[in-house]
Amino acid sequence: LPEIALAGRSNVGKSSLINRMVHRKNLARTSSKPGKTQTINFYRVNGRLYFADMPGYGFARVSKETKAAWARMIEGYLLNRRELKGVIQVVDVRHPPTRDDRMMYDWLRHYGIPVIVVATKADKIPRGKWPKHMKQVREGLQIRADDPLVLFSAETGQGKDELWNAIAALVTEG
Ligand code: GDP
């Protein structure tokens, strides 16, 4: 089955996104403790594809060795997996993308891996501020014109259809 990987810093809302996309309350474990997941977790969706939830990046207080091990695992997966159709990179719509966010996006683009950027937690800012925050995300990551950017909320389900459409485009393209 085709696979779509999820990347994002710890605690950004990847598990919540997966749960919202697959109609499950607690399929993917959410946690308030950053940097907990250290393996890639696979979630089968309707027998059609897998979401590959990668451990969060950007947790500051881990050793160099831990970071290096993380990078090896992620790179090994992203560069060698034949089933991989693309990556959903999740960022927090409230804040400018971090240096780690930019590095991840640039890395994916460098290797020609298709990216869907999801700006999540939309429910946490007022509607009137969405355009300004989306611009901040677009410019902070320097998102290419042909890469989808989806405003999302795991809380309200906003952006769910748009994200499914973007995923479907990646899965059928390949
Ligand atoms: P992960 O570490 O990236 O998997 O992040 P989680 O999915 O565990 O989410 C981290 C925290 O953010 C949890 O307390 C979630 O309830 C909260 N959260 C995630 N997505 C949203 C969202 O769209 N809206 C709101 N209000 N909270 C969210």
Image (tube, rainbow, N blue to C red):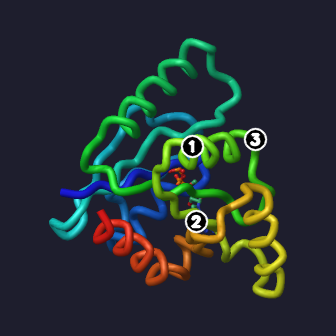
Q: Secondary structure at mark 3?
A: helix
Label 1, ligand 1: CB separation under 8 Å:
no
Q: Secondary structure at mark 2?
A: strand
| Mark 3 vs 2: CB contact within 8 A | no
Q: Nearer the viewer, mark 2 or mark 1?
A: 1
Q: Which residue is mark 3?
A: 99
- Please say if 5 is above or below 66: below
Check disc 3 and give the amino acid type: Arg
Looking at the image, in which quadrant does ligand 1 appear?
A: bottom right
Residue 36 visible in image = yes
Residue 51's quadrant in the figure? bottom left
Whichever of callouts 3 and 2 sits on the residue coming sooner in the sequence is 3
Local crowd at mark 1 within 10 Å, few (<14), some, or many (≥20)?
few
Residue at 15 percent of width and 66 percent of height:
47
Report whether 150 appears left or right of 37: right
Local crowd at mark 3 within 10 Å, few (<14), some, or many (≥20)?
few
